[in-house]
Image (cartoon, rainbow, N blue to C red):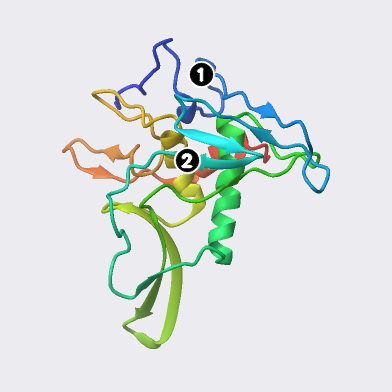
Amino acid sequence: MPSPLPRNEDGLLYRCSYRPGDTEVAAPYELEEDPEEDENGRRTYSLHGPNLHFRVDHSVIHILTSDANPGNNIPQPHTRARPKDDKSREMWLRKLGEYIAAVMFGKLKNESEKPFVLADFPDDIAFYLLEKTRSDKPGERRTDVYLRSQAGLVFATPHEFARHSMWLIDGQPESAQRTACLCKYCDCVVDDEGKATSAPQRPITQDLRALSGYS
């Protein structure tokens, strides 16, 4: 049986560990509505604080901490970094912003409000493209994008990184027995022999979608 999730000084689950049905969980971070609407007439929100590990500027989320190894985290060979204006990068940042806003701030998508977006990935976390070929079909080339924090932490979709980003926002809380992160790598499954394997992603994604208002 896995160790219980860490709790804060008030005995509550950290916000990053919030799953559907949880009741003893820290309240969402309370954002402040900005005095002026954006150019499209939508409300925006901000939050700054000396003890926070993130900030929000007009519904743009900045993660101020990282668990990545310093330096270049792009593995070799057959890889290359994706530019700032890459379409897949923009999609990741939009989807992460949506999930973070829903879980950490209690803010669901609303047509009268500017959608939340992540400004960029945390420091030293690399977003890159990997080109693959199959041995049985050498003429066919496949490309996929990944986000890499360090060896063993390679995220293939924004759904995989969402929980890890929330854990960073909460300040990387953990206990002696367990981390509060619910991503597939940190909340891994350990068998009777002590061997750890990644948790299945489907239940994680289902929880994220439920908390974000998707039926």
For this rendering, which residue is in front, 125 or 148? Answer: 125
In this image, 130 relative to 191: left or right? right
Q: Please name the amino acid that badge 1 sits on.
A: Ala
Q: Position of residue 162 (x, y in %)?
A: 49, 43
In this image, 18 relative to 111: left or right? left
State the residue position of label 2.
Answer: 63
Task: Kindly indicate whether the residue at mark 2 contacts the one at mark 1 (C-beta within 8 angstroms).
Answer: no
Mark 1, residues whose alpha carbon is within 10 Å: few (<14), some, or many (≥20)?
A: some
At 50% from the left and 51% from the top, the residue drawn is: 120
Which numbered circle lies on residue 59? none
- Residue located farthest toward the right when viewing the structure as drawn: 41
Q: Nearer the viewer, mark 1 or mark 2?
A: 2
Q: Position of residue 198 (x, y in %)?
A: 33, 46
| Mark 1 residue element | loop
Q: Earlier in the sequence, mark 1 or mark 2?
A: 1
State the residue position of label 1.
Answer: 26
Mark 2, residues whose alpha carbon is within 10 Å: few (<14), some, or many (≥20)?
A: many
- Residue located farthest toward the left when viewing the structure as drawn: 193
Q: Is residue 13 above or below residue 17?
A: above
Q: Is residue 19 above or below residue 118?
A: above
For this rendering, which residue is in front, 27 or 120? Answer: 120
Q: Please name the amino acid that badge 2 sits on.
A: Ile
Quadrant housing the N terminus:
top left
Quadrant housing the C terminus:
top right
Q: Position of residue 57 (x, y in %)?
A: 61, 38
